[in-house]
Image (spheres, rainbow, N blue to C red):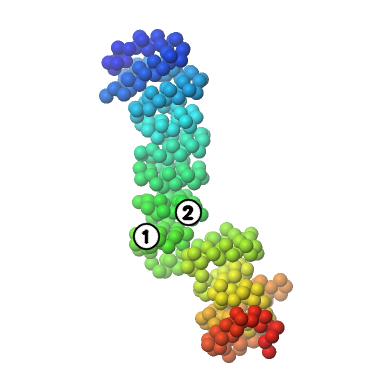
Amino acid sequence: MNSRLQTNVSAMMALAHQRTEHSRIELANMLANVFLEDGADLTMREEELINELIDRLMSAQTPDLRLQIAQKFSGSTRMPRKLALSLANDSIELARDVLINSATLQDADLIEIVTTQSVGHAQAVACRHSIAEAVVDALVTTGDLDVMRLVAQNLGAKLSSKAVDILTEAARYAAELRAPVLQRPELTSECAIRLYWWLSQDLRRIALKRFGITSGQINEALAKTIEEFLGYHQLEKNNDEVMLQVADWLAEREVVSTAILPQILRLGHFRLFNILLSRLAGIALSLVDTIVAEIGGRGLAVVCRAIGIDKAGFVSIFLLSRGARADEQIVHPRELSEALMAFDRLTVKASQDMLHSWKLNPDYLTTRH
């Protein structure tokens, strides 16, 4: 029998039967000494005895007393499992140190606590020195961003492919997750590419250096990211305030260019298209609205020529932009022919001069001849 337990077993049992606050504190002191002793391995009979003593000890319902008991064991990572479970399922004030430090809690115990107790309990588990994959899976599926951030920052946590996928998806919409997720050793190049356009410029440079992402992969990721991001805002595509914020989001990533305009139109985001065209051309949004709605497409031909869009690009934009019409969306061949003739007659220099004059006189449609 463990020497300290053997020496004090009678006194411990006597204290357990007294059921006073003072006796419970004394019993906690004695048990703590047993488990703080080096090499304090217990036999099955000794474990049964300890469990009986713990049951009597933790029958106290006074929060202050339970806190004092927890503090007695705060220096022991080898706390008896039954006591650790009792404290770990208590209020977070009592549970925190146990959840972070106890080596006797098993993975199944931690998963049960994460799924049944408070977010604070999950956050404490996420701070453990070492966390198995199954426990990490339970933590990241809580959906709590603070829990996810703590897991991502904890290099003692082992991430499964499932956890990496969940964290990558969450990081696209939660800025606080992006840097720690990008630094995870388990992050794959595929996940890095999915995350790429959601990162800041500095983090994108880190991703390029670490994963060697190619320009083709970057372009493909951009198209997919735009589609997913606009899909997220599908119900708000006619809300100018929201679309202006989306345009800002694209501008922050330095991807606002003529190349993405056809994709924006194919996704049915006509207001966003007008906003981006307004920014690329440097003219008022109200003027762009008038130009795009104009029958014949002559004004749109000028804008496209001026900002460097070629003939094929213009045709694509002209036809797709007709989808914004409230009535007939089919383009008559004669209208397309007129638009192409207007485009062919224009030079880049003449178009840029006209665009400059429109900036000075946005009412050009009512004054031009």
Single out the residue that lies furthest toward the right: 327
Q: Position of residue 38 (x, y in %)?
A: 27, 24
Identify the image quadrant of the N terminus. Answer: top left
Q: Residue at x 38, y 67 (%)?
A: 214
Is residue 363 found left or right of 63 in the rendered image? right
Q: Residue at x 51, y 35 (%)?
A: 118
Amino acid identity at mark 2: Ala
Q: Residue at x 57, y 58 (%)?
A: 232
x and y percentages locating residue 134 in the rendered image:
42, 40
Tell me the kind of residue under disc 1: Ile
In the picture of the structure, the residue carrying the numbered disc 2 is 175
Inter-mark Cα distance, 2 to 1: 16 Å
- Which mark, residue 195? none
Helix, strand or loop status at disc 2: helix
Task: Please give the name of the residue rendered at 36% of the width and 39% of the height, measured from the top-left corner.
Answer: 130
Question: According to the image, label 1 marks what residue?
Answer: 206
The residue carrying pointer 1 sits among few (fewer than 14), some (14 to 19) or many (20 or more) residues within 10 Å by Cα, namely some
Label 2 or label 1, whichever comes before in sequence order: 2
For residue 82, what is the image quadrant?
top left
